[in-house]
């Protein structure tokens, strides 16, 4: 799988154009890497503070799943 770059800020839903001057995060390793760019540091911090699992338990996809299968645990 190729390295995926997302320039749409997942918090503000605005497209980020000047990638060198905006914060980003990198998830995954090697070819299975995702880079997400943010409009500002506040949006990046809000994204990182978002829980990755459903608060009621084992519902939905757990983004921390390290298997290559990406099994829906719900």
Image (spheres, helix red, strand yellow):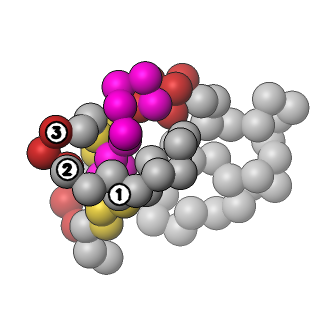
Q: Are marks 1 and 2 in contact (CB under 8 Å)?
A: yes
Residue 11 at what x, y percent from top left?
A: 54, 40
Q: Secondary structure at mark 3?
A: helix
Q: Are marks 3 and 2 in contact (CB under 8 Å)?
A: yes
Q: Which residue is disc 2 drawn over?
A: 19
Q: Which residue is disc 1 drawn over?
A: 7
Residue at x 68% of width, y 37% of height: 53
Residue 37 at what x, y percent from top left?
A: 33, 47
Q: Which residue is disc 3 drawn over?
A: 21
Residue 24 in the image: above or below residue 8: above
Residue lying furthest right: 56
In the foreground, 26 or 9:
9
Quick check: is 39 in the magenta stretch? yes
Labelled disc at residue 16: none
- CA–CA distance in space, label 1 to label 2: 8 Å
Determine whether, in the image, residue 73 is placed left or right of residue 47. Answer: right
| Pointer 1 or 3: first along the chain | 1
Residue at x 19% of width, y 50% of height: 19
Residue 49 at what x, y percent from top left?
A: 54, 23
Quick check: is 52 in the magenta stretch? no
| Pointer 1 or 2: first along the chain | 1
Residue lying furthest left: 20
Image quarter (top left, top right, bottom left or bottom right) of the N terminus: bottom left
- CA–CA distance in space, label 3 to label 2: 5 Å
Residue 61 at what x, y percent from top left?
A: 68, 53
State which region is magenta: 34-43
Residue 23 in the image: above or below residue 36: above
Q: Are marks 1 and 3 in contact (CB under 8 Å)?
A: no
């Amino acid at each position: 799988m190729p390295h995926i770059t997302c320039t749409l800020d997942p918090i503000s839903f605005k497209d980020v154009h000047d990638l060198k001057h905006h914060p980003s995060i990198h998830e995954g390793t090697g070819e299975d890497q995702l880079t997400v760019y943010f409009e500002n540091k506040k949006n990046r911090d809000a994204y990182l503070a978002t829980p990755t699992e459903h608060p009621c338990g084992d519902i939905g996809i757990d983004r921390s799943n390290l298997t290559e299968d990406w099994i829906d645990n719900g």
